[in-house]
Amino acid sequence: MPQTLARRRVLEGQRAAPGMVLGRVRLQLAQRHHVDDSPLPASETEQELARLDAALAHARGELTELRQRLHGELAHEAKPFLDTHALILDDPELRAGLIDLIRKGRYRADAALVAQRDRLIELFRRMDDPYLRAREDDLSHVIARVLDALQPVVANREERRMAARLGEILVTENPSPAELASLAERGLRGVVATAGSIYSHAAILARSLHLPMLCGVAEADGAFMDGDLLLLDGDGGAAIAHPTARDLSMLRQWQRSQAARSRRTPVPAKPARTRDGEDVFLYANAELPGEIAEARAMGALGVGLYRTELLYLRQKSLPGEDEQYAALRELMIALDGAPATLRTLDLGADKAIGTGLEMQPEANPALGVRGVRHALRYPEILRVQLRAMLRAATLGPLRILLPMVTLPEEVAAVREHAHACLQQLHAEGVAAPPELPPIGAMVEVPAAALGARALLRECDFLAIGTNDLTQYVLAADRNLGALDGLYDPRHPALLRLIAFVSNMARRSGKPLSVCGEIAGDSSALPLLLALGIRELSMLPARIPAARAVVEASDCARLHIVVPRLLRASSRAEIEALLCMLQQP
């Protein structure tokens, strides 16, 4: 009988990491652990505690072994995420809760782990925090690793499946950063996750490793089978099973363009210029000094947003001034005279667990003591960071950016602390600039956007963080997949706020940038250009495409449609205008 041709199938998902690869599906179904929920006899309590401690030690040993095995760029990129999991394993509160369940509740070790995990996850979900999904995922991954250690037969079977994935595309529910690092070392080509978020630690690591990834592909585990040929398009947000000749031609074209780009000399660091002569300044978002080389090779003019939280997440104690200065010094040296915008610490109560930051539990950390609110409540932590930043300012041009600003008075208070720190450094004979570097505010709270006129009187510059601004304006958690259809930075309300802030900045003559995800979305760039945005900060890999869009645009023509954009009452109208703007 003639063989039946496999039918092409396309599933769409959220673009977690760009790139395009072809490989065979390796389907990893959600692992089910056997949990014994029968009461534990009192005589077996100590034995069960010893079993738990042995499993925790085994899980720690696995993470240590993985860190030692990884080398080069992979080790550099994966280390922060492995450290986060190690911190959770070492959390004394986690172990104390488990011991209490075993001793007093007569839980067996595996049942105690599941109960503790479910209790904490429920607590996180009630917080409704924008970073919740990543924290929930981290906890689930760590508990699963300990459960594996308690059930070695399952763990060994999983290791054999993992070892066979050379050159394949993993289709799974929600990979952990540790698993991703291990599989990348063995030649994994890409990832299709049925759950997860583009803001998860696994997605961040995939982007750093240039490993194409989609998340939120809900039907993938049922639609794809082990061994299926799969074309993963991380740029277009699609996973194509049994690709056709036309699909493969698209892959070859993409590969040729990538090869041509790799042969090119680094793009000169100069503004992108529109067809009618407007300069648009393209910067990179970064959180590791190692990302700077890629950003400069892509033509970034500097770093438009440098996140400083990673230094706090790597360890249990607060980083000191010298430690922070050493990290910033590495950044400034790598930039070699190009400017950097350094964002001060922005961790909510949920993210501060195990970092040394003393933060009280909050019912809703997304609306709690974070960003500049935390800085002014704990000025001794702020001053250490400001002193390190001021010392780094002697190595190149930098700006200080304050997150979660609501009132001009908050910026004024930080400026006073910065002046005091600068005077201290001068008095101590420590190298520091003669004057304060520019100090600006993130516009991510609706009140900051609506109060931009007053805010600009106190700030030297503004940066619109569209990720948080979108979720606060639309009351939609950016990590909650059920609200994907609502969470959209191209919503008419958001565009009106961006237009208002842009107008206020232009009138004041002060710089304004956009550094949220929309800044690197090539399809949305004409909207930002039309609204007067001329500074954009994005992932380094997105800079070439953004430059191409800018250079093909005519700002005078785009500006004509602004009144229609601001009158739009639906996203459908915005999309129609966007299509019109993209026409030659």
Image (spheres, rainbow, N blue to C red):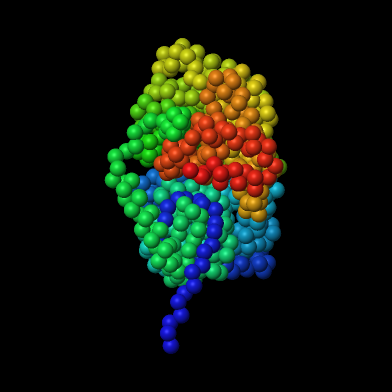
Position in image of residue 390 (x %, y %): 46, 21
- Left/right placement of residue 416 relative to residue 568 reads left
Q: Relative to the observer, which residue lies in front, 405 or 360?
A: 405
Q: Residue at x 41, y 49 (%)?
A: 209
Position in image of residue 165 (x %, y %): 40, 65
In the current view of this chain or complex, which residue is farthest to the bottom? 1
Query: Image quarter for residue 187?
Result: bottom left
Q: Is residue 225 above or below residue 337?
A: below
Position in image of residue 74 (x %, y %): 38, 49
Position in image of residue 428 (x %, y %): 44, 14
In the current view of this chain or complex, which residue is farthest to the top? 427
Count of numbered circles on the image: 0
Kindly tell me whether residue 207 is visible in this rendering: yes
Q: Is residue 91 above or below residue 343?
A: below
Q: Residue at x 60, y 26 (%)?
A: 503
Query: Image quarter for residue 188?
Result: bottom left
Kindly tell me whether residue 540 is visible in this rendering: no
Q: Is residue 408 above or below residue 330?
A: above
